[in-house]
Amino acid sequence: MLYKIAVPVASILIFLGFWEFLVWVNGWPNYKMASPSDLPPAFWQYKELFLIMGWQTLWRTVVGLFLAVVFGTLLGMIIGFSRIARDALYPLLVGFNAVPKATLVPVIALLFIGQHDFNTVLMAFMISFFPIAVSVGIGLSTLEPEYRDILRALGASKFTIFRKIALPKTLPEFFGALKVAATLAFIGTNLVEIVSPHGRGLGALFKSGETNGNYPLMFAVLIALAVLGIVLYYAVVFLEKIFAGWAERAQS
Amino acid sequence: MTTGRPSGGPISERGGDTIENLIEIKGVKHAYATASGPLPVLDGLDVSVPTGTFAAVVGPSGCGKSTLTRLVAGLMKPDEGEVYLHGERVKGPRKTVGMAFQNPVLLEWRTIMDNVILPLEIVAPRMSRADREARAMELLDMVGLTGFENKRPSELSGGMRQRASLCRSLVHKPEVLIMDEPFGALDAFTREDLWQTMRDLRRAEPFTTVLITHDLRESVFLGDQVIVLSGRPARTQYVMDVDLPEDRTLDVLYTPKVADMLHILRDQIKIAQGRDGGAH
């Protein structure tokens, strides 16, 4: 337990030490590159903003991710069970995923003018549903026929087979994709927060730091984003342990 | 539900008028649709399995043996011919069938106990948890998995997993057990252990069995009849009645009588493969 905490903490401290050293050795001033020692004052000065904006970013990301899970799972079920749907939808999905989402910011900003929360959640959703849909789809379509046959031979319904076998069997793949999706959702949220005017959230705070030439604030925002990302990632890991912990044991 | 075995008498007594054929396959033909046209896999399959007996099916690889199991299980319908269970035409899956495959297909997220009771969740939804577990324990004890009921499949060896899989296919007391090369992936000694387990299970709880196998010794040790299928498209090429005592031990495999039987079967397989049967 001590080891599990000590090792990552030590690696973070070494990283911060190296960063501080780089800035010091190069003699970079504050307006060129902030050093870790500049960050605590920046956090302290804007602590209320950080709490408000951090919460904004977090809830929008989580809502977007939640929608991505619901939609992605449904889509994955469709492409997993139906060959026609798979053949029809895959090119469309891959194409949509390949479009850089930054180009969609002005599109949705115009479509839903002023709906800042909605736009942000929508972007987080759009950027993160793809890996979930693909992994659920692949998990379902590659289910070995024997797994289906043990229940089908007893006259079990398709829904029963899905609930008792297909669904739990795809959970490890689902959580693998969810970890990727959680990080992507953050990128989506911040994309909108940074680009759109009068934004809220940590992205907007970053933008205002940039406008005012406040480098320590900008870097403090990046660190805050990293921390939120880590929190969300480990929340997913926690859920994975509960719902798909068996997969970890199966591999060992 | 379960049908008794024919009074434990010598095997040669079966086939008499009094004993019903539980499984009756008559003139079955079947072809799969492939990109390059229909691929016939079965062409004139005739199999009769009397109630309570054990039919071992052997044949060259890829000859359509697995299709046979899916037909009996009601998972597919033949293009031509009929499959009867209890004199009733098989139209779809029925709850009185148990299946086991080469891959034990245990569910990794369930304990061994929960894997074994899975069929009961479908077949007997109102049965209490305690009753289900008691029934599963009965079988787990019989196959020597006492004390492993709370383990995960990944914690068991290949042979133990196959034992658990056998328990699962028998937990709902099926009339018919269909096995598709269940011991094919096991090492020789584990396989022999499982043959004996299989023999003991049949003694304790009568059921009718169709076993697909590549192992002639296995077919003779376990079978009451050995059915040799021809190469694809498969038809029934040869049927051997295994005239051996019901209480067989592995020693029986080393008797001259069994050696002769194995020899005949071996020649039949050669013919099925389209090679010369050799001087006999």
Image (tube, coloured by chain):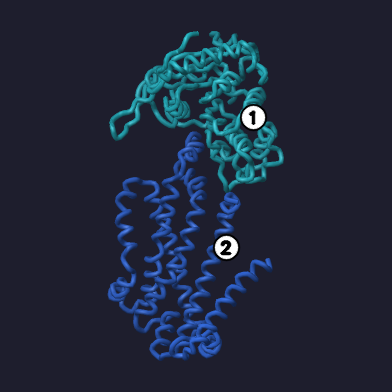
| Percent position of residue B172, x then y | 59, 33
Q: CA distance from mark 1 to mark 2?
A: 43 Å
In the drawing, what numbered circle is on residue B189? Answer: 1
Badges 1 and 2, same chain: no
Determine the colour of chain B: cyan
Q: Chain of mark 2?
A: A
Could one spot residue B71 in this view of the protein? no
Residue at (59%, 11%) from the top-left corner? B243
In the displayed structure, B181 sits above or below A243; it is above
| Amino acid type, mark 1 | Phe
Q: Quadrant of residue B40?
A: top left
Disc 1 crowd, CA 10 A, few/some/many (<14, 14-19, 20+): few
Looking at the rendered structure, the number of numbered marks drawn on it comes to: 2
Mark 1 falls on what kind of element? Answer: helix
Viewport quadrant of the N terminus of chain B? top right
Q: Nearer the viewer, residue A38 or B139?
A: A38
A231 with respect to A104 (left or right):
right
Residue at (31%, 76%) from the top-left corner? A109
Whether residues under marks 1 and 2 lie with C-beta atoms below 8 angstroms apart, the answer is: no
| Percent position of residue A206, x then y | 43, 83
| Percent position of residue A37, x then y | 55, 87
In the displayed structure, A46 sits above or below B152; it is below
Mark 2 falls on what kind of element? Answer: helix
Determine the colour of chain A: blue
Q: Quadrant of residue A111?
A: bottom left
